[in-house]
Amino acid sequence: MVSVKRVLRRLAFAYKIAASIVGAGITFFASDYLIGTIAGFFVKGDVVLYAPVFLLSLFAALITGIELISSLTGSIKVRFIRPVRRAVSKPILGFFSVLSIGMAATIASPLFVLIPENVMQFELISIASLIISATLSTLMARNYGTLYKYSHERNLDSVGGPSFVRSATGPKSLRYFLTRLSLWLANTALAAYSALLFSDFDFQIFPGVLSSFSIGPITVNIIVVVVIALFVFWFIINAFFEKKYTKLIGLVQVFLVAILGVIMISQTILLGSKTGWNMAHLLPVPKNWAFDLIINVGYVYLLFFGFQEIQSVEKESMPEVEINLFNWKKFRITKENYLPLTMVLAVSVGSAIEIFYAIAVFSTHPSQQLIEKAAIPAVTISRLVLGNVGALTISIAFLISTVGTFVTAFVASSRHLRSLGEDGFLPQSMSSASWIFSILFIAILSLAGENFLVSIIDFMALISLSIINLSPLWLRKATLTTLKRSDGLPLFVAMFSFVTAIAEYFITPSVVLFGVLALVFGYLIYDLFRLGSIGVQIFTILFDLVSFLLLSLISTTSFIPETPYIALPAFLTTPHLFLFQAALIIGPVLIAENLLIDIFILKRTGLVSK
């Protein structure tokens, strides 16, 4: 016979499922209007009546939705835990496997879109921006290497760039939190951007490329489906079984990167040879070249920060490797030395390939209108200059790059979110289900559009890297009076990264404002969760009620809400207060009931987190 206690727990579980569904709806509704409102206030210059009250209400609704979703994951952690990874008995990644990881993250999918568009629009400024970004990234890689050696010698955590900040400032510091959150958002946006590119390519471009070889429509559709299946399969293997198949993944990665490198180099040579490396119209230099240069460096920087993924596989890397240079000479290098070397090599070789490819693309002088209309400009250029075979080979390179970029970005996004939970910035339930939340946010960000995603990746990555590069000074407690000559490199790289990130404001102000608000809101969430589960629910109820009362003061006839960022059905966009007030009433009622369930049924009585 089923006990009353078990029945109550099942009913509580069912209630939390229903509440989480409502919470997901409120979260989407509030997020949609919040982004649209921010865009209206700060970008379009729209002035909406009672704007501060409306913004406050949206923040309250957003926190309510997140709390309702979080209440479910906190009750079913076991059901949502990521598939258990088997521990590696010994590190098995060698020099070339580690190098291929950095190369794959550097020769990423955005280059097939950004380089053709940027180099044809900004010409010499674009090429100069690529060179400066590559130099900046190389200096960062060198600084990462120095940080790794310092941490390795002192047995400090050295897995991932934010770990350096954590070691220097502590696991609860604001600097560490901002670093983790920025890189999480940057990688989530990069995964969303890669997913958009893959979708455009596989459904719009690839069928046309295949059809040019007289392949029938049925066969074309089969190939497209197979490509999607392989994408999903490789994603699952990397995301959930990385530890179990680390060696296999490393070998496949080396093979794929080798193919990618050969295709990109051959494409560069063929494009340049076909056009005679025509550099016409590269000069003169624009009048405002210095300002344009700084802004453009920030825009193209996402092409060069992939080297840091090497740091994330530090534990899987062999303590010592033997490098055989064509049976001519053998070297044995310890991990302390070859990891920094692979980071510098990855960014140097990858950057060289991208810069020379940009020069080759410029030499073709394609129509600016043609580039703007093309979903993947690199494929269009190859088809025009090199024919169908050229289009097919660059398509293969694009697929390899896109799959690698998406998988790497998703794994990094999930890892950063899990680390935030493990360090107490987020609920432990969110940490154990980090991959689910990463997929959810990837889906949400993919609705924002490609231009927005490119800019937010650049801004958040540069902010995070500017903080990370100051870690050497914090590790040795440096002050203005104790600075050394060796501190010049991290100071220069950090300051240049920060200035470049701020320059992003002059391209898309909404992105910088969104990034800043994301960091502020993230830290607000952190402070809230320090109250513990019960404390957060009490705070949310009070916040919703205050927002509801303030919203009630607004006259229905004078209330004009902003247009949501993503189009919604007409009944959800009517200029009335009812929907907003309903969210602020239904939410607290559900949270109050959830609070009673936690206290009297699930016996969770902690007011403040431990």
Image: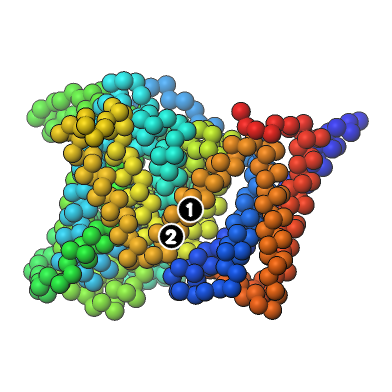
In this rendered view, identify the residue nearer to me: 427 or 56.
56
Marks counted in the figure total 2
Q: What's the colour scheme?
A: rainbow
Where does label 1 land, which residue? Answer: 518
Residue 529 in view: yes
Q: Quadrant of residue 194?
A: bottom left
Q: Residue at x 40, y 54 (%)?
A: 190
Mark 1 and mark 2 in contact (Cβ < 8 Å)? Answer: no
Please state, as top left, top right, bottom left or bottom right, where the N terminus lies in the image: top right
Does label 2 or label 1 sit earlier along the sequence?
Answer: 2
Q: Amino acid at mark 1?
A: Ala
Residue 269 lies, in percent from the top left, at: 14, 60
In this rendered view, identify the residue nearer to me: 248 or 555.
555
Residue 330 lies, in percent from the top left, at: 14, 26
- Is residue 149 depicted above or below 544 in this figure? above
> Any mark on residue 513, and which?
2
- Is residue 505 depicted above or below 160 in this figure? below
Residue 137 lies, in percent from the top left, at: 23, 47
Residue 463 lies, in percent from the top left, at: 35, 49
Residue found farthest to the front: 481
Say whether residue 502 is left or right of residue 548: left
- Is residue 105 depicted above or below 49 in this figure? above
Dot 1 lies on which element? helix
Question: Alpha carbon of mark 2 to alpha carbon of mark 1: how far?
Answer: 8 Å
Dot 2 lies on which element? helix
Q: Residue at x 70, y 74 (%)?
A: 555
Q: Amino acid at mark 2?
A: Leu
